[in-house]
Structure formats: C-alpha cells, structure tokens
Amino acid sequence: PLEPVFTTRDGGKTVFDLSDTFYTDRYRNNTQEVSDRFGQDVEVKIPLQEPAKIPNLSFAKSLGRKKQFSLFNTSHRDIATELIKIFLAAPNVQQLASIAAYCKDRVNPVMFQYCYAVCIAHRPDTRDVDIPNVSQVFPANFVEPSVLQDARQEASVIGKAGNRMVLEIPVNYTASDREEEHRLAYFREDIGVNSHHWHWHLVYPASGTMEIVNKDRRGELFYYMHHQIIARYNVERYCNNLKRVAPLNNVRDPVPEGYFPKILSSVLNRTYPARISNQQLRDVDRPDGKVELSALEQWRDRVLAAIDRGFVENTSGQRIPLDEVRGIDILGNMIEASPQLSVNSQFYGNLHNEGHNVISFSHDPDNRHLEEFGVMGDVTTAMRDPIFYRWHSFIDGIFNKHKALLAPYNAAQLQFQGVKVDYIEAKLGVANARPNTLLTYWQKSTANLAAGLDFGPAQDENIGASFTHLQNAPFTFTFNVTNSSGGPLKGMCRVFIAPKSDEHNHALTLEDQRLLAVELDKFTVDLMPGVNTIRRQSTESSLTIPFERTFRAVGASYQPTAADELARFRFCGCGWPQHMLLPKGKPEGMVFDLFVMISDYAQDAVQQPNNLPNDACSTAFSFCGLKDKLYPDKRTMGYPFDRRLPNNTLSALVDSFSNMTKTDLTIKFSDRVVQ
Ligand code: CUO
C-alpha cells in the first residue's frame, strides 16, 4: 500500500511532499516515480520537516518487511510497542509526519499501519486526523483475490474513474454447502464485522505504553465485546438451523472445522494458509515464538482455580478478590492477556493470545514448511474462521463461570421505583407495517478499493467493488412508560433480543437466554410525571456505525453528497456494522423475545473526569466506549443479563419488575438481493 500517509478532514487533498527530501534512499534517483505516486492534481503539498532525530529502527529488524505481523505474537507486539513509543514521542504533528514518513518504507508495512493508527487514535493533537479504514488500506485481507487482479487491470487500462466497471466480489467463494459451517460465512466474512474487530483491538491495544493500554474497564470490555460476538454468532446459528458453537475446551482433540480462506496476505502476495478438517493442534516451536499445549492447559487450570477460589494472586503474593465490580475487569486483562495489566502474567500466562497462535500455526507448527500463520493469527482476519468462535466460546465460558458464581441480582439491583414500562414495539418505517415484524435481506453495496492497490490509481480515484451482505430494513422502537413518582426521573433504556427456542425448537430457560441475549441499543431517557412515549430509530443504536463509516461507499455512478463527505472525514471504524444489527431470522419468520428495561440513571451515571465534548466518532459506545472518557454506564457490562437472575423464566422476571417488559418479535428473512 503506497497511499499518502495522511489525509485531513479539511476536504482538500493533502499529501506530505517527499520530493525534496528523500527519506528512503531508493527514491532518490526517481523523482518522477515519487510525484506519480501522489498524482498531479493534489491541491495542498506540505513539505516535510527534517526529523529532529532520525529514529534507530534496529529493534524492528527481526520482523522483516515480508513477514506477517501478528498482534497475538509477543515479540511482534514488543516491536510494535517500540514504534508506537517513537510516534507518541514526536513533539508535534509536523515531526510525527516526518518520522512516520521516514519509518514507513523501512519497517513491516502491516505493523507500520497498525502503529500509525494506534498513534493517531491516541495523540491529543491528532484528534481530527482520519484513521483510514483497514479494509481500504489492505483490501487483500477482505476480498477474493481475483477481484484485486481485475481491479489492477481496470485501473491500468481505463484511465477515468467514471468509465471503470464496478467489479463484483463473489458470494460463497470459501466453501460449498457440503460444509455446514459455510451457512455462517456471510457473518464471518463480512467486511464490516472484520473491520470492526480490527478497529476494536486498535482502540484497546493489549500492550504499548501505559497511557494507551490502561483504559477504563478495558479488561471488562474485552470480555463483553467478544461475549456479544459469541451471543450474536450463536443466535445467527439458530437462524440457520445449527446448534450453538461447541467451545474448544480440549486442545488435544482434532479440530473438525477446516477453513480455506482464499484471501491474500498483504505482504506476501500468497493466500493465507488453510487448515484441513480434523487438524490436530500441536506445540508451536518457531523462530519468533514458542508455546506448548501443556502451557495453555496449565494457564487455563490456574485461571479456573482462581475463579473457584474467588481471588487472584499478584506477583507479590497478595490476594485480590474477584468481586462483582472489578473481578471481570481483572480477569479480562489477565486472560487476554495484557502484559502490562495482567495481575501476574508469569503465573496466569497468556491464554487467549497463545490459543490464537497455536490454532493459527496448526498447519506448520515448527516452521518446517516456512508457512506463515493462518487467519486466526491476526485480528484483521481472525473472525473469518469458524474456529474463532470455538476458541472465543471457550474463553467466554471462563468469564461466564466467574459471573455465574456471583450472587444473582436482587430486587434492589433491578427495580426502578415509580417507573412502569407499559408497551413496547419495533416497527418498520413503511405504511401499514405490522408491529414487531422486522425484515432482513441481502444487499449489494459498493466499496472503493483504490487506496489499497499498490501502484493503483491516484488516491482520489475509484475502483469500485461490489459485494453482497446482510441488511435490515430500518425500524423504530416505541415505548410507553409511566412515571408515577411525582417528579421527573431519568432512566437508562436497555434493549435486547433473545432467542426463545433452540435449533430443535425446544424452549430456552432464562439462564440460557441471558447468555444468548443480544444487545440492540442503550440510551438515556427523561421521564416526565405521567405517561411518556419514547421513540428511537434503529439507526441510532449505541452499538453500530453507519455504512459510510464501515466502507467508503463509492462506485462508478456514485456522487458523494456533502453529508457523505463529512461522514468520510469523520471516519472512525470501531462499531458494529449497522447492516448486521439484526440477526438474519428465517424465511418463515423467527420469533425472539424483545426485552426492554429502564434502569435508574441515578445508579447508572458516571462522573466523567473531563469536559471534553464527545468525539465525533464515539457513537458506538456499547462496544467501543468513549474516546478519552470513562465507559458511560456504571453497571457491569451486559447488565442485567451478565449475572444470574432471581426468576426461572423471562416472563416471570418481567412480571416481577414493572420497569421491564417484553414482547414477541418476528424477524423475517427475504432471500433476495436489493441493489
Ligand atoms: Cu478479538 Cu481473540 O480477541 O480476537
């Protein structure tokens, strides 16, 4: 990828001009090539300053430019941490630009992109600088490779963007219907789902400097964001008549799920290695990392024992209780693990990360074939593989065990005196729509691949590629709420859906339902005395980001409006894609419980440490938090479904508490493609 390092939100084309000072010696004799790279029609050229100090990049030598970079690999992460420190230490943005330009072609490109994006996301003076979406910078990680070949051809043969064909990314290219797991490929291989996951790990790095790692409740959010992904995946499996995913509890068992990714690695121009069906996992012993299966088992046993005992021990032997407030956060950082935030990484190890490594190298654990890691080795691509969900179900099971050992929520923790939710509905925004019947279908959309094509067209030109993804018709929630307290109240409205029955149509217990509950939205409401009617659009969800932020939506016939441009320049990719807000449902309709609870905001409110306005990007706070602020909900994440509840059924629960209610919600899937 050779796109300019920076774009700014001023609406103009800005590049940092490398033509006078050659930070990479190879360019010195080829001024023409340098100016070609940035196109002729650049409006603003910013000459780069000399870096005050040329950074010593010898620490990055062992991760070659053609090696795959993995955030799960400890030595790779240590190298990235050094580069991030260099970027963060730059005294101002001009110096940062110079240093970044100096480093860009001298270190591993994928690591560069990651470190650069982490730095942009964390420096106060780059608040207004875009982080290019990973699916545009490294499109090879997201689409079937023959499309990229066509894209290059299209770019080189057809000069004007307007005349170029929109290329089509095929659906169903990774497997056939003989493979049951392939029914979920639309979820696992969704560009928005994968780019969200990459951005999440970028916003919440496990290692780096303390100031970027040590975020409010990051361990808890690691648990919650991945827990919700597993809940969503299991619900999606029910929609496709599959049973829940089996946790990968035993690393000695062969893994029945094979996966053949067929996407290209960004640095090697070869496809990611595949994993055959029934692969046995083995000890990894490679030049840049070793891990034994027995270590995974030992760490697992120590973590589970700590949960049973109700405390962890830090490096000086002090006991720290795994209580109902801090316990989950401690466990999240310890199991992921974050070397900086784990209470004792020597003892509790690096369970989740090393599991990714063992799985991702199962095809060549000792490097005898000189193969790189499979898709599980990188946060950009891991969610494509069925085994991601098995591994994360296992990790989620450990967290859930801790939660299950806490006392069930009691009435005082659930009720909101004086508040009664009388009525809820979700309704499509079309005339004569039936309440509580929602719709999903396929949609064909277009994304621009231009930024990620080496020697492709200039940055302002388009290579449109169309792809088919799940979509839901927009809808509106309506709630009627009575406030009989006599004065105004403020509440937090928490909206979930939960499946009512499993793949055999057996009714689920509340204990099953709470682990499968999918958060749809969370927002504050002001309740005046008397009856209140609250309306909320599905597009306002606290989980999602709009399409324009997931993809830079351009194609041959696409003319961006001012609002699109604004969205593009407010680009920020952490957030569940809006088009995946609802599970697919079934053609005949699949019935869910739509659940709403209004909790007492007096107990939910968080006193923010600063008065900074909310960052324009911070709209998907349920999964991504708020930039530079505390997580804006004091309850533990997932409340009220993160702990056991005092009733056996959801009906009994909502009957016991007036501030909750539920209704049947049907999601119908229509198997047609809307352009
Ligand atoms: Cu996000 Cu395992 O943590 O991939």
Image (cartoon, rainbow, N blue to C red):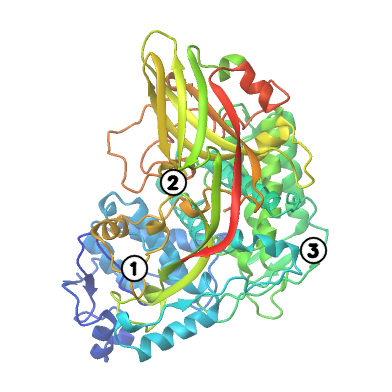
Q: Secondary structure at mark 2?
A: loop
* Amino acid tagged 2: Val
Q: Residue at 72% across / 36% down in the picture?
A: 512
Look at discs 2 and 3 and give the one toward the viewer.
2
Within 8 Å: ligand 1 and the Cβ of disc 2? no
Question: How far across and down, in percent of the image, does residue 624 sit?
Answer: 45, 45
Residue 108 in sight in this render:
no
Q: Residues within 10 Å of mark 2 (few under 14, many from 20)?
A: few
Q: Is residue 319 above or below residue 69?
A: above
Q: Residue 399 is drawn in which quadrant?
A: top right
Q: Residues within 10 Å of mark 3 (few under 14, many from 20)?
A: few
* Amino acid tagged 3: Pro
Task: Look at mark 3 in the image and give the residue it sits on.
Answer: 256
- Residues marked 2 and 3 touching at CB (< 8 Å): no
Q: Residue at 30% across / 59% down in the picture?
A: 564
Question: How far across and down, in percent of the image, does residue 229 sit?
Answer: 59, 48
Q: Secondary structure at mark 3?
A: loop
How far separated are the C-alphas under marks 2 and 3?
45 Å
Q: Is residue 153 above or below residue 184?
A: below
- Residues marked 1 and 2 touching at CB (< 8 Å): no
Task: Look at mark 2 in the image and give the residue it sits on.
Answer: 430
Task: Look at mark 1 in the image and give the residue it sits on.
Answer: 55
